[in-house]
Image: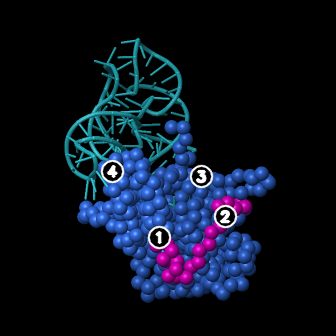
Amino acid sequence: MLYQAPRGTSDILPDEQVYWYYIKQQVADSCQRYGYQRIDTPLFEDSRLFSRSVGEETDIVDKEMYTFKDKGGNQLTLRPEGTASVCRAYVEHGMYNLPQPVKLYYLAPIFRYERPQAGRFRQHYQFGYEAFGDDDSSLDAEVIDMAWQFFRALGLNSLLLKLNSIGCKECRPNYLAVLRDYYTKHTGELCPDCKARLARNPLRLLDCKRPSCQQIARLAPKSVNYLCPQCEAHFSQLKKHLGRLGLPFTVDNYLVRGLDYYTRTVFEIQPEVEGGQSTLGGGGRYDSLIEELGGSPTPAIGFAAGIERIILNLKRQGVVIPPLPKPKVCMAHIGDIAAEEAIRLAATLRRAGISVVATSSGKSLKAQLRQANTLQVSYTIIIGKQEVEAGTVVLRDMATSEQQIVPVDQLLEQLS
RNA sequence: GUGAGUGUAGCCUAGUGGUUAAGGCGCCAGGUUGUGGCCCUGGAGAUCGAGGGUUCAAAUCCCUCCACUCACCCCA
C-alpha cells in the first residue's frame, strides 16, 4: 500500500456516516433546547493560547501538541482541546458586552499526538459547549443536566455521572499543600508514575489505577474537606439542584481532570462497564481562565464529549440508529434513444426536488434493476424505445413489484 | 514514550517448509426477447504488510522496519 491515513487518524466512510448524522442531529437539538449558539473557531491557534490555558505542566501541552512554525515564523498548534479557542473568541469579540451568560457550542476535530488504542486517536471529534458570565451553581446544574439529557436522548443507558469539587484559586493551594504533605510521607510506597505526579501535579495522584496507590489515595485528604466557605456553599447548592433535577450523580472524591484551568465543579460521564478509554465526556468550571487570557474576570463552565467514543458505546449497546434517507428513484433505460431521454427526465425530476440516481449506461435492464435494488430506491423508472415514442414511462414500485404505465407529464404528481 | 499480540483479494477466514495460495461475503456477467431480491453457473480481484536473510524450495523459519489491535501513561 503506497499511502494510508496517518497513524491514529481514519476515514469516516459512507457506512459510518449514519452515526455521525444522528449525533450531529442530537447535538443541534440539544443545544437549541438549552439556548446554545454555534461557534466555529480556527483549526489552529497561537501555541501559547493552549500552553497558558491548559497548563504548561499537563501532558497535553508537554508532549501531545501538534505544533509547527508557519512561513511567517508564527508558532501555531492544531487545537488539542476545544475550550481555549472559544474563550479566546469570547475575549477577542468583546462578548462580555452581550447579555450574560453567553452560551456557545462547537463540534470540531481535536488533535493530540498520542499512541492510538480503543477509543483514542490522534485526530478525533469533540462536541462541547461553554457558558460564560455566571457563577451561580444553578448554571452548573443546568450544564450537567444538558450533558446527561444529551446522552439519554442518544439512547445510551447505564451511564454514571461523577461529580467533585476541587476548590478555587483561594482554597486549592491549602488543599494541595496538605495533599503533598500526606503523599510525601508515603513516597516509598508509590509507583514510579505517582512519584513524578507528586512533583508535577499532585491532584492526579488521586486517580492512579494501581491498587497499591489507590489504597494510599483512599486515606488521602479530600478536596471537599478543604473548600473555602464560598466553594463549600456552591458545591452543596449544586448537589441540591442536581437532586431536584433527578440526576443520579455520585460524588467521587478521586475525580480530577487533566487540564489545569478547572476550578470548583468537575464532572464526568462514563459507561457503567469499566474499560480502557471509557470516559464519554467531562467538564467543569473554569472561573479564572478568561481573566488569565486577558479578559475581564468572568466565571465560566463547560463540557465536552468525544464523538468516536459515543459511537463506540452506541454500537456496544446496540442502539438502533434511524437510517439515512435513500434516493427515491432509479432511472433505468434500454437503447440509445431512451438513454438520451433518461438524462433529460432525471434532470427534470431532480429540479422538482426528487432524488434520482441514474444507472450506468450500456448495462442490461437486469443489471440496472439489480443496481436499483442495492440502492434501495422506492421506484424505478424504466424507459425504452416504445415508451419514448409513446411519451410514457414504466413506473415500477420496488417494494411490491407492481408496474404502471404513466404519461411523462403525469409522472411528477405520481411521485409526489 | 513503555509493554504484549496480530498482519493472506474490498471484508471475514483456511493454509505452519514442497506444483498454478483455498473458501465465504461483496462485486461483475450469464441462466429471458425489456425486469431486482431467492437459487444455479461462471468471472474478475492477492507482488501472502515492506525489506533483507536461512534453504534445493518460504505465506510458513530468522532479523529489521512499517501498520493495526490491546494495555500502561493520559484523556474525549
Work out whether residue A225 or residue A338 is closer to the camera in this orientation and state it: A338
The chain containing the residue under callout 4 comes to A
Is the residue marked by circle 1 packed among few (<14), some (14-19), or many (20+) residues within 10 Å?
few
Q: Are marks 1 and 4 on the same chain?
A: yes
Amino acid of disc 4: Leu
Q: Earlier in the sequence, mark 4 or mark 3?
A: 3
Which sits in the foreground, A85 or A64? Answer: A85
Q: Position of residue A365 (x, y in %)?
A: 33, 50
Query: Residue B32 lies in what quarter of the image?
Result: top left
Pinpoint the chain carrying mark 3: A
CA distance separating discs 2 and 4 = 50 Å
**What amino acid does circle 2 point to?**
Pro
Give the residue at mark 3.
A113
Residue A44 colored magenta? yes
User: At x 47% / y 86%, what residue is drawn?
Assistant: A240
Span highlighted in magenta in the image: A26-47
